[in-house]
Image: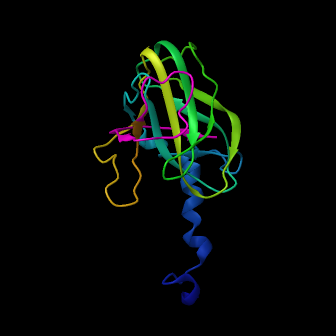
Amino acid sequence: MTAVMGRYVGIVRDELSYASDVVRQELGGADPGAAFYRCNMPRLLAAADTGALTTQVMTSVPIYLRKGDVVTSLTFRSGATAASAPTNQWAALYSSAATPALLSQSADATTAAWGATTNKAFALASPVTITADGWYWAALMVKATTPPSLVGVSTTAAAGIVTGEKNLAQTSGSALTGTAPATIATPTAVATVPLVIVT
């Protein structure tokens, strides 16, 4: 057994049993096999009103996806600040490449209301089937007189600390309107990390 499992000599199923418990906790008791679901952080940690958005600038966060996952929607939750006079709002999924490439974007929700403490699901124009395990990027952009604040966490360690670490959240682009950029170019790490749920 040690030749196969290294130093672990117990029953493998026992060692992995925590995984289903963690998933159930993340889903609030839901059956983890009932629907596809990925999240960039535990819901219990998403306790801050981050105010993460800047008008016409895209915010993106890394999320680990598995080969075979089919992504159809990205959901964000606003904080205490609602969107004021929005004109463009969309979400997008980017690849795991060194310079992440656009995989799919939602329709532009334009002037649709986004109230305070409200979930907003952005359905991707085309579902994305993940072809390899890796860190992908979920992005959001709102152009508004006042963009909504977002539920998430704030941290002073958002930028990668050691080689290979991803930014926990980053901004990129400027003067964006209805179309997501083709790539995430020259991103800047930010200390506010919004919660995103991928379904």
Residue located 70% across and 51% down the image: 33
Residue 55, x across and y down, in percent: 42, 21
Residue 174, x across and y down, in percent: 42, 27
For the C terminus, which image quadrant?
Answer: top right
In the displayed structure image, the side of residue 174 where residue 106 appears, left or right: right
Residue 164 inside the magenta-drawn segment: no
Q: Is residue 139 above or below residue 90?
A: below
Give the main secondary structure, helix, strand or loop, of the magenta stretch. Answer: loop
In the displayed structure image, the side of residue 12 where residue 99 appears, left or right: left
Return the residue found at the far top: 85
How is the structure coloured here? rainbow
Which image quadrant is residue 3 in? bottom right
Residue located 70% across and 39% down the image: 127
Which image quadrant is residue 72 in? top right
Residue 85, x across and y down, in percent: 48, 10
Residue located 46% across and 42% down the image: 61
Q: Which residues are magenta?
A: 172-199
